Amino acid sequence: MAAWEWLSKPAPLVAPTLLGMVLVRQFADGLQVRAQIVETEAYTAGDPACHAYRRKTRRNQVMFGPPGHLYVYRIYGLYHCLNIVTEAEGIASAVLIRAAQLDCLPEWIPANKRLKPARVAAGPGLLCQALRIDGSHNGWRLEPVAAGQEGIWLEGSPAWEAQFPIVQTTRIGITRGVELPWRWYIKGHPAVSHY
């Protein structure tokens, strides 16, 4: 299977396979922060909670592919959310990375948040804050980069056979499409978001 072939599937098939994989954020100074993905949600074009439900726009155009790119958007005018684009080019589909466990706490994490390190990236907005991901990363390709360059990529292999107990349930924090069971998380993991 080609490196990104598995991302060419619909988001509900890809989302659970991302659990346990590691999202790597490399900064220009060489610092790398790794975050094990512990919670995901799927969004597709036919889903009323999806940004691309009605049509393709300037804001959501990255969701239409190709797969393996980042779709980053702002919510509530304050926080950014990180999605990985999936499915074939031309079809809107993405996986929201809801929560992750950082391997280390970068120096910019405030002292009060260091008291509960598992909670630093326990939500989509918190994850982007912890990894310093914002709208400028929208459209970036998930791929390793050379030292001295900024990049974001995945490490590990898709969890086609779960190595840990996974819970599948309905998504949270939305008002439409609430009945779809398109949220997955690692059972009992302390970094899973509360809401």
Image: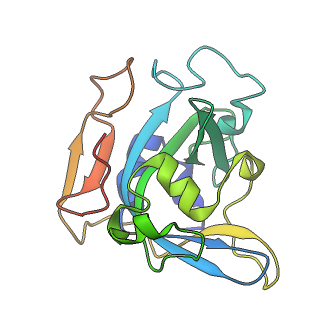
Q: Residue furthest right?
A: 148
Q: Is residue 126 visible?
A: yes
| Quarter of the figure with residue 12 | top left
State how the image is colored: rainbow
Q: In what quadrant of the picture does the C terminus appear? A: top left
Q: Is residue 3 above or below residue 30?
A: above
The x, y position of residue 69, in whole percent, is 67, 52
Name the residue: 68% across, 30% down.
Answer: 60
Name the residue: 57% across, 54% down.
Answer: 128
Q: Is residue 44 above or below residue 139?
A: above
Q: Nearer the viewer, residue 185 or 134?
A: 134
Q: Nearer the viewer, residue 150 or 2?
A: 150
Left or right? Give the position of 16 relative to 162: right
The x, y position of residue 83, in whole percent, is 56, 47
Name the residue: 58% across, 25% down.
Answer: 51
Name the residue: 27% across, 67% down.
Answer: 161
Q: Nearer the viewer, residue 32 or 153?
A: 32
Left or right? Give the position of 21 relative to 195: right
Q: Is residue 108 above or below residue 78?
A: below
